[in-house]
Amino acid sequence: MRFSLPLIALGLILGLTSCAPKMGGKKSDLIWADEFSGHEPPNPAKWSYDTGGGGWGNNELQHYTSRPENAYLLNGKLMIEAHREAYQGNAYTSARLVTRDKMVFTGGRIEVRAKLPSGRGTWPAIWMLGENITSVGWPRCGEIDIMEHVGYQPDSVFGTVHTEAFNHLLNTHQGGQAYATDLETNFHVYSIDWGEKSIAFKLDGNTYFTFTKPANATTEEWPFDQPHYLLLNLAVGGNWGGQQGVDETIWPQRMEVDWVRVYKLK
């Protein structure tokens, strides 16, 4: 989510449909989940909020809040909703939910079933950051972008990793692209299989990119032996999301999240 321009390395573009997922691989115990049932706000035992404006390193336009207008539960789903409104010096509001200080993960299958927003200027993401980001900084902490989508490319999603050796500042970040025609109208499962030597990125269970741990890797190439936390957010504009401008007539827009499930891999 932190990178600006998507330079896709080692990517594979696939034509995928919304058919029932073929999950592939093996998973065993469910170790963490949120089904977003009930009518309460997002469970504070599982989620916190990153709040504020200032562009978030990408010249984004939104101010992230913890208000129920921007993050709420409806019909068993989490709604992350962006509004066009003046708020504390920003022209938009939205939400960014995180599991930091609640739950972190080191490996496993992370699955999120979601329906994406539409329109120029939307930039939703499902991603992870190393828990040690406050001590070592980015990109040394590691970043796993399970899913990113920009509204001006409505049929594409992207999966990417960033590390100290592989990141957009060096034009070396590693990622892939997958394709589906109904990302903004139907739910899809975005997931990774994160093992000891590779991270496989999947859309509806179909792998479209695998990042493999390099031989003799140090933490510069592979910081993924360390715990990471999960983030769900909807940004507005920014260096990537706003490359073709922001349509001011489409708001509010929202990312709907049906569930989040994390399994231990066999």
Image (cartoon, helix red, strand yellow):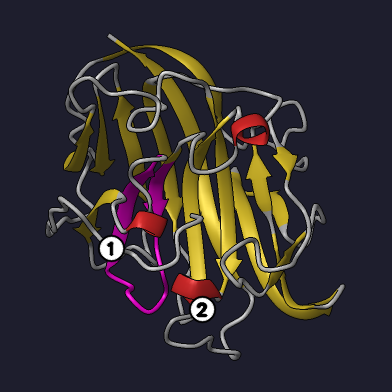
Q: Which residue is mark 2?
A: 121
Q: Which residues are magenta?
A: 144-163
Question: Which amino acid, by three-letter code, is at mark 2?
Answer: Gly
**10 Å crowding of disc 2: few (<14), some (14-19), many (20+):** many
Q: Residue at x 60, y 28 (%)?
A: 131
Question: Which amino acid, by three-letter code, is at mark 1?
Answer: Leu
Q: The residue tagged with tag 2: helix, strand or loop?
A: loop
The vertical placement of 147 against 47, above or below, is below
Query: How far from the left and from the top, in percent, is residue 15?
Result: 12, 60
Closer to viewer: mark 2 or mark 1: 1
Is residue 149 inside the magenta stretch? yes
Q: In the picture provided, is 242 more to the left or to the right than 168?
A: right
Query: How far from the left and from the top, in percent, is residue 27?
Result: 29, 15
The vertical placement of 149 against 230, above or below, is below
Q: In the picture provided, is 191 more to the left or to the right than 181?
A: right
Q: The residue tagged with tag 1: helix, strand or loop?
A: loop
Mark nearer the N terminus (2 vs 1): 1
The vertical placement of 39 against 263, above or below, is below
Mark number, residue 7: 1
Q: Is residue 37 visible?
A: no
Q: Residue at x 73, y 67 (%)?
A: 54
Camera-side residue: 205 or 185? Answer: 205
Q: Main secondary structure of the magenta part?
A: strand
Residue positioned most to the right: 88
Camera-side residue: 130 or 167? Answer: 167
